Image: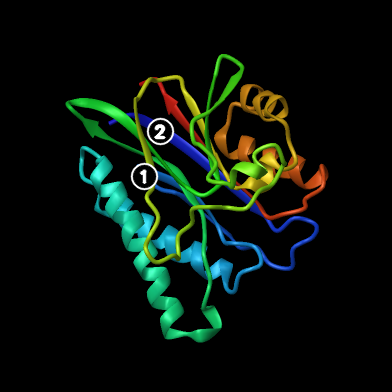
Amino acid sequence: MANIRAGAASDVGKVRRRNEDSALAGRSVFAVADGMGGHAAGDVASRIAVEALQRLDDSAGANGVGPLDVRDAIVQANADILGAAAADPAQGGMGTTAAGLTLGIVDGDECWIVFNVGDSRVYRSAGGSLEQLTVDHVAPEAVTMRRGVITRALGTDPGPRPDLWVRTAVPGERYLVCSDGLSLELTDEEIATVLSSVPDPVEAAEELVRRAVLAGGRDNVTVVVVDHRPD
């Protein structure tokens, strides 16, 4: 399997009273979940989503996980959130985004499986440039705004269809998974500068969060940086 090193960081920001984001930097699964702002128990929903992805990471064998495994984990996360909401009326209406990537073998090749539900994002950083791999699930009329109404999230019935992409794993690549608290405050150029200038993934994650909070910190900020290092 690939030589992977990852780092994660999170901050409540300057406005929110509690951090509704959750993150996972596992052995082969890396993810961020952003509890829905304005909904009840967003922090609970994001934690439930990450717990489902943690179980996926725990169950991964020598070949990692496949696209169907990722889909099933997201479906289960949605069911778990709905079940928790039904069991506790105070948590009714809670929801969360979920985005990330997992390492696995597809058709004999080592691959990254990128997934997304909502407006948390996955980026690829290489050669000083930044490429957004996921597509934000927001209302069309909100595309030109810095924030929009989310059209797909976990905690809904029927459950959302996750976006899935498969990419060949290439040593030397760096990936970023983040909640929208990062992209709300920093431009792609600012993000790319940190990712290309801070080699340690833990320090890079911490620096991105620090800069987002200094830039305004209007939302919770959560970041996972994943490095695929040459053997």
Q: Residue 80 placed where, x, y %?
A: 37, 69
- Residue positioned 24% across, 41% down in the render: 66
Q: Which residue is mark 1?
A: 27
Q: Which residue is mark 2?
A: 4
Disc 1 is placed on an element classified as loop
- Residue positioned 57% across, 61% down in the render: 35
Marks 1 & 2, CB-CB < 8 Å contact: yes
Q: Earlier in the sequence, mark 1 or mark 2?
A: 2
In the rendered view, tell whether residue 114 sits above or below residue 18: above
- Residue positioned 45% across, 43% down in the render: 100
Q: Residue 45 placed where, x, y %?
A: 50, 67
- Horizontally, residue 118 falls left or right of residue 148, namely left
Q: Nearer the viewer, residue 59 or 83?
A: 83
Type of residue at label 1? Arg
Q: Residue 199 placed where, x, y %?
A: 59, 26
- Horizontally, residue 59 falls left or right of residue 137, namely left
Type of residue at label 2? Ile
Q: Residue 151 placed where, x, y %?
A: 53, 52
